[in-house]
Amino acid sequence: MDSMEFLETETGDNPVGCVIWMHGLGADATDFEPIVPMLPLDQDLRFVFPNAPIRPITVNGGMEMRGWYDIDPASPLASNDDIRQSVDAVNQLVEAEVAKGFRFDQITVAGFSQGGVIALEAGLGHRERLRGIMALSTYVNDHEHLAERVGFANVDTPIFMAHGVSDAAIPITRAITSRQALMDLSYQVQWQEYAMGHQVCPQQITHIGQWLNSIYSQ
């Protein structure tokens, strides 16, 4: 995968950290940018919103759209190669932020839906300790084999997981199974659920801001 296009925004002149935030299937880098001014942040942060590549999506009849990986219900693990490529691309973004002066442990990876799958995969497997992992309305890919893929560097990294109780796209039971898989491996998971579908709600935006404050004030 070539280097990704991305949007960037900073909430002030001296960001103490950087959040790399991946959008969901069919969306793009502009999807979560408008949320940044709504976050009740105590400290300045840099946000990077990458664009996933455009690819045919099997579950959507082969329609082309931005996606971090293909979804083929007939072959759930067929997306693993796509996921690995997307994780590699996100890791390159992390390296680019380090080259700009951030330490690895100042960088948080975040994502919604498909983007959250990539954030979890990238964060749990990263060779350096990151600041946090934010997984919104999402799940752990191939959670039965998670222990074989994770690294030890991020075993203490805070994880924020949030889900809508009436999510029809990714049922909350799938997220709860993923949370259990993480907790079985001793990861620290902060869990929130909301009376919503496959989306983001105002209360959740407040909680995201509070969680970012908590991890960056340490």
Image (tube, rainbow, N blue to C red):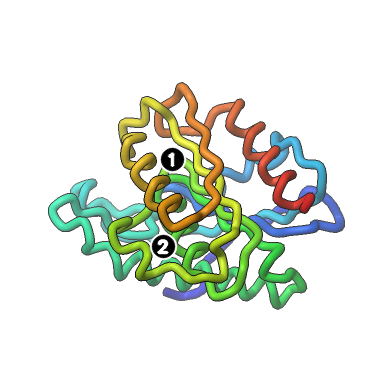
**Relative to 43, residue 149 above or below:** below
Query: Label 1 amino acid?
Result: Ser
Whole-percent x, y for residue 75 in the image: 16, 58
Would residue 115 be seen by someone viewing this image from the given angle? yes
Residue 154's image quarter? Answer: bottom right
Kindly identify which numbered label has been placed on residue 89: none
Left or right for 196, reference 34: left
If the image is split into quadrants, where does the N terminus sit?
A: bottom left
Q: Earlier in the sequence, mark 2 or mark 1?
A: 2
Left or right for 113, reference 99: left
**Relative to 62, residue 93 above or below:** below
| Residue at 30%, 63% in the rendered image | 145
| Residue at 40%, 51% in the rendered image | 114
State which mark lies toward you, 2 or 1: 1
Query: Label 2 amino acid?
Result: Pro
Q: Mark 2: which secondary structure?
A: loop
Judge by depth and name the residue closer to the eye, 72 or 160. 160
Whole-percent x, y for residue 80 in the image: 29, 66
Judge by depth and name the residue closer to the eye, 183 or 151. 183
Neighbour tally class for label 2: few under 14, some 14-19, many 20 plus, Cα within 10 Å: some
Circle 2/circle 1 CB separation < 8 Å: no
Left or right for 69, reference 217: left
Residue marked by disc 1: 137
Kindly identify which numbered label has been placed on residue 53: 2
